[in-house]
């Protein structure tokens, strides 16, 4: 499903959390889909089960998954994207860096706005498709 | 659970371990690292009940290990120098183990034999080094250990076999909450599999922590200022190591990573990168920072 990168400096449990968030946000994993058990995922990725446990706890804390005792862990349907200021700041910094680099390599400043609208409209298009 | 309390040991006049503490929780994988001659194998031989300590306690599931048949029958141990009875095949060794270890699991033995594709009828002395290690692993896992002690287990194993070995260990940790203690110099591999780390140096445990906590406690910073570096930086930060490369400063700083980033941000640097350290870097800077010689610990 996804790869863990041991060369990446990000802690392993964070890599797992981020990977799952992406899968959930992009609706690869849908509401009430079952997550693999800690044991199975640990075996598949050859990672310490405690690391997986920690990642699941974090995902549950952030509201992406829920656990039914004795049955398993599932994807939440109504998870509210609680606004994470820290995360937003990090993402804003990333955008800033990318935009500055884009201008530096010669991307015309006047085209920035069009590009920005393009991103936003592609997102809206995706939403429409979801409604079918 | 493996617990070592205030362990000391001397051979003749030389002190090898002094006042050493160690704790491996149930269902945890603990990585023991240290330079050559730091005392890793001596410590392991105390945990497996081979050596008698001068002072202190060695407990597994709250019972002393030394001369304790019941506990010893639950320890899986893969030594650095493997030993098999002379002229024995793996099959004969298994038969011997089955008589000694009350929790011997023949079904598991057969399954693992197929998985590793070993010839159980062949004389073990004709096995290659790597195959002997696999044979030893099969035997150790088939006694259904509550504690698995591995002294440099990965040497001589090919990547495919290594993966198999770790998968089986991970499974037992998840299913039966087996405690695992691994000593190794392969820090990359340890980083992926261990949840706790202990760094041993000259018979002392200089650091023992959860690996994620450890990583959030020390970081590498690349920073550049417009003009001079603020003079109070040295006082406000616990800097282990500092290097200047052109106009960019590189520092290894101890302390809460988020706090450090916030503090540095307040100086409005031109460039700021806060990176977590790899285990290898932690090892080197921790040892170097406490005034030990970095040389001699080269991986």
Image (cartoon, rainbow, N blue to C red):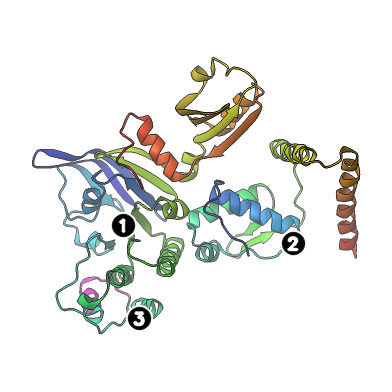
**Which residue carries the number 3 mark?**
B110
Count of labels in the image: 3
B86 in relation to B170, above or below:
below
Could you tell me which chain the residue with mark 2 belongs to?
A
Q: Which residue is found at the position 87% from the left and 57% from the top?
A: A127
Q: Disc 1 vs disc 2: which is toward the camera?
A: 1
**Which residue carries the number 1 mark?**
B152
Outermost residue on the bottom side: it is B121
Instruction: Give residue A86's position: percent from left, percent from top.
Output: 69, 36
Q: Which residue is found at the position 14% from the left and 75% from the top?
A: B86
Q: What's the distance in space between the residues labelled 1 and 2, CA to CA?
A: 45 Å
Q: CB under 8 Å between callouts 1 and 3?
A: no
Q: Which secondary structure lies at badge 3?
A: helix
**Residue range highlighted in magenta:** B93-105
Q: Disc 3 vs disc 2: which is toward the camera?
A: 3
Q: Which secondary structure lies at badge 1?
A: loop
Q: Dot 3: within a 10 Å radius of its alpha carbon, few (fewer than 14), some, or many (20 or more) residues?
A: some
Q: Dot 2: within a 10 Å radius of its alpha carbon, few (fewer than 14), some, or many (20 or more) residues?
A: some
Which labelled disc corresponds to residue B58?
none
Which labelled disc corresponds to residue A31?
2
**Left of B179 or right of it: where is B212?**
right
> Relative to the observer, which residue lies in front, A18 or B148?
A18
Outermost residue on the top side: it is B231
């Amino acid at each position: 499903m996804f790869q863990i990168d041991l060369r990446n400096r990000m802690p392993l449990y964070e890599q797992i959390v981020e990977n799952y968030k992406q899968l959930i946000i992009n609706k690869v994993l849908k509401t009430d889909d079952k997550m693999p058990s800690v044991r199975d995922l640990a075996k598949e990725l050859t990672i310490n089960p405690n690391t997986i446990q920690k990642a699941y706890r974090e995902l549950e804390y952030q509201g992406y998954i829920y656990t039914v005792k004795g049955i398993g862990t599932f994807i939440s349907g109504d998870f509210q994207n609680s606004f994470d200021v820290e995360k937003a700041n990090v993402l804003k910094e990333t955008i800033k860096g990318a935009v500055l680099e884009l201008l530096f390599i010669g991307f015309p400043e006047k085209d920035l706005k069009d590009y920005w609208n393009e991103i936003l409209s592609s997102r809206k298009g995706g939403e429409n498709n979801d409604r079918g | 659970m493996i617990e070592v309390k205030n362990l000391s040991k001397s051979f003749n006049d030389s002190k090898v371990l002094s006042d050493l503490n160690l704790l491996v929780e149930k269902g945890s994988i603990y990585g023991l690292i240290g330079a050559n001659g730091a005392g890793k194998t001596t410590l392991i031989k105390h945990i497996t009940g081979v050596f008698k300590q001068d002072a202190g306690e060695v407990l597994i599931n709250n019972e002393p290990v030394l001369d304790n048949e019941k506990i010893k029958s639950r320890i899986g141990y893969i030594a650095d120098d493997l030993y098999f009875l002379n002229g024995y095949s793996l099959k004969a060794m298994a038969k011997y183990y089955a008589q000694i270890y009350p929790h011997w699991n023949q079904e598991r033995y057969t399954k693992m034999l197929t998985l590793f594709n070993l010839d159980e009828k062949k004389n073990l002395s004709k096995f290659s080094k790597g195959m002997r290690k696999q044979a030893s692993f099969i035997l150790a896992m088939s006694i259904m250990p509550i504690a698995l002690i591995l002294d440099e287990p990965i040497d001589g194993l090919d990547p495919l076999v290594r993966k198999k070995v770790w998968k089986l260990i991970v499974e037992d940790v998840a299913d039966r909450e087996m405690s695992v203690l691994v000593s190794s110099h392969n820090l990359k591999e340890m980083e992926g599999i261990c949840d706790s780390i202990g760094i041993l140096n000259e018979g002392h445990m200089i650091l023992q922590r959860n690996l994620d906590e450890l990583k959030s406690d020390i970081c590498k910073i690349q920073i550049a200022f417009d003009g001079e570096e603020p003079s109070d930086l040295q006082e406000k930060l616990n800097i282990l190591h500092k290097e200047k490369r052109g106009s960019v400063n590189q520092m290894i700083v101890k302390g809460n990573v988020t706090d450090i980033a916030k503090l540095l941000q307040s100086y409005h640097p031109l460039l700021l990168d806060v990176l977590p350290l790899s285990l290898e870097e932690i090892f080197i800077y921790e040892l170097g920072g406490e005034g030990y010689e970095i040389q001699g610990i080269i991986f």
